[in-house]
Amino acid sequence: MKKFLKKIVRGIVKGAIYSYCKIIYRMKVVGKENIPKSGPIIICGNHKSFLDPPLIEVTCGRYTRFLAKESLTKNKFLAVLGIVFDAILVKKDSKEVTAIKESLKTLKNGDCLALFPEGTRNGLAKGEDVKDGAAFFAVRSGAKVIPCGIKGGEKGNWKVTITYGKPLDYSEYKGLKDKETLDKVTNDIMNNILSLTK
């Protein structure tokens, strides 16, 4: 019963967010056909604002679980959204085992995992190193990565366009854990994301 009620609430909230983004930001979605309708996938996008997770949630057409910093739950609204959308919470600067296990379980169940390799909003602009979490989950699980580019939504350019690229297959590296491999996959993922923001 609890799952059923959460599903209803999730549907209502997604509908409200979709309408809001469509009206306020004139949201446009490109490349949705690149998202497989079933099977495990990892959606990776650039991170510009708090709007990014809801944008992916309401446009990808899949049940999606986001990796999110635990600190976001200090905001009551974001905390509620985290519960409604089954977010996987990660402690800051921590490779928390529970979050890793839950993420791999999500992919094993054939669902969608979503995260932002920048790790924080405008991470690249701030000079932050791109995180290798997406690469780790891709090579560990064999799930394909869907790059996602989000542009617009800021002062002077309110119109938001979210573009999904073709699936990236890293199955040739499945099971590898060395830094060189993870760095290579991470760079490839980020380059694909950035190409979709131009």
Image: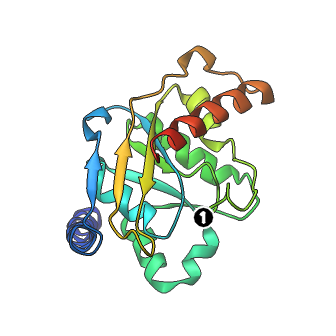
* Residue under the point 48% across and 77% down: 79
In the rendered view, tell whether residue 36 sits above or below residue 100: above
Q: Residue furthest top?
A: 172
* Residue under the point 40% across and 38% down: 109
Q: How many marks?
A: 1
Where is mark 1, residue-wise?
121
In the rendered view, tell whether residue 112 sits above or below residue 128: above
User: Where residue 63 appears, x then y in whole percent?
Assistant: 32, 50
Task: Sort mark 1 into few (<14), some (14-19) or many (20+) by Cα contacts within 10 Å.
Answer: some
User: Where residue 74 appears, x then y in whole percent?
Assistant: 58, 83
Q: Quadrant of residue 125?
A: bottom right
User: Where residue 85 appears, x then y in whole percent?
Assistant: 38, 63
Q: Residue furthest front?
A: 156
Residue 181 visible to an observer of this rendering:
yes
User: Where residue 51 appears, x then y in whole percent?
Assistant: 43, 68
Near-viewer residue (121 or 66): 121
* Residue under the point 27% across and 66% down: 10
Residue 169 located left or right of residue 189: left
Label 1 sits on what residue type?
Arg
Q: Quadrant of residue 126?
A: bottom right
